[in-house]
Amino acid sequence: MAEPAIISVRGVDKVFNGGSDRAVTALQDIDLTIGRGEFISLLGPSGCGKSTLLRVMADLTAPTGGTVTVNGKTPGAARAARDYGMVFQQAGLFEWRSVLRNVELPLQVAGAKKDVHRAKALEMLELVRLSEFAGHYPWQLSGGMQQRVAIARALSADPEILFMDEPLGALDEMNRERLQGELLRIWGDTRTTVVFVTHSISEAVFLSSRVVVMSARPGRIAASIDVDLPYPRTAETRTTPEFFEKVTEVRKALHGAPSEQAAA
Ligand SMILES: Nc1ncnc2c1ncn2[C@@H]1O[C@H](COP(=O)(O)OP(=O)(O)OP(=O)(O)O)[C@@H](O)[C@H]1O
């Protein structure tokens, strides 16, 4: 991690329902430093705390111990400053708003002038290559196109960081691979720091500059593996021996980690 840190997680614990007989230790003593401009995947078996860790960084849930700094601020202050955007597994678009009006919504809510948010939304639609669908409604688009709209919306306020929680998990394999390529192109164009949750080893290796492997409950960091395959990565990259070697290295780290269930 050569770049200066943009996210720092120190000694973070998260216990749900603490003090009750339903207590769940989702995260235990997590230390993680993410450099500006990195593409980091959080990889691990179901229930290991990937989403919880992402949600702690994004101020969607509070840690029960430790400290988190996002872009030099508390997660709450970073959220208020719109330092990050979020994309989830479901695109979560408003069905009654056109694609363009979905993308401009965050800027509209933030009080930007109409001509400013309109121009920005059009620029974002160009970035995700959906300009000609600006006037369409979400139900007229495929699942992959809806996710590209969600990415455009998340990037509309020029955030420093993009938090993505299994954003491609609901897509079929072909669309998923296509969108992985698109996402790398967008990352290359914007230089946003990306933190990406997935259970797919090949997806994590293809996309990331670093894969953080988590072990199952209580969620801990089992390994941090640099992926030194050169960018831009293409369909060709997936066929190289170096790609297979990295997938194997990550798989070993994942299976070496104590886990209740094996990941896909
Ligand atoms: N709000 C909550 N209340 C109680 N327990 C929770 C809550 N949210 C998550 N958990 C528990 O914390 C653990 C970690 O959950 P989390 O969703 O972070 O895992 P994950 O690795 O993202 O899983 P998946 O890959 O299945 O989405 C799980 O055991 C889950 O049941």
Image: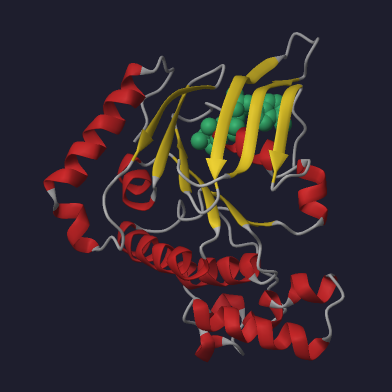
**Residue farthest along the right direction in this orientation:** 111
Would you say residue 61 is visible in this rendering?
yes
> With 184 as the anchor, is 23 left or right in this view?
right
- Residue drawn at the location 77% of the way across and 52% of the way down: 79
> With 15 as the anchor, is 137 left or right in this view?
left
Looking at the image, which is closer to me, 91 or 81? Answer: 81
Q: Is residue 149 above or below residue 24?
A: below
Quarter of the rendered image showing ligand 1: top right
Q: How is the image coloured?
A: secondary structure
- The N terminus sits in image quarter: top left
Q: Is residue 254 above or below residue 23?
A: below
Q: Is residue 159 above or below residue 21?
A: below
How many discs mark residues in the rendered view? 0
Q: Is residue 93 above or below residue 251?
A: below
- The C terminus sits in image quarter: top left
- Residue drawn at the location 26% of the way across and 49% of the way down: 229
- Residue drawn at the location 63% of the way across and 58% of the way down: 160
Looking at the image, which is closer to me, 113 or 20? Answer: 113
- Residue drawn at the location 55% of the way across and 60% of the way down: 192
Residue 114 x %, y %: 81, 88
Residue 49 x %, y %: 57, 29
Residue 145 x %, y %: 48, 73
Quarter holding residue 17 = top right
> With 15 as the anchor, is 109 left or right in this view?
right
Residue 50 x %, y %: 55, 34
**Residue farthest along the left direction in this orientation:** 241
Would you say residue 87 is visible in this rendering?
no
Quarter holding residue 8 = top right
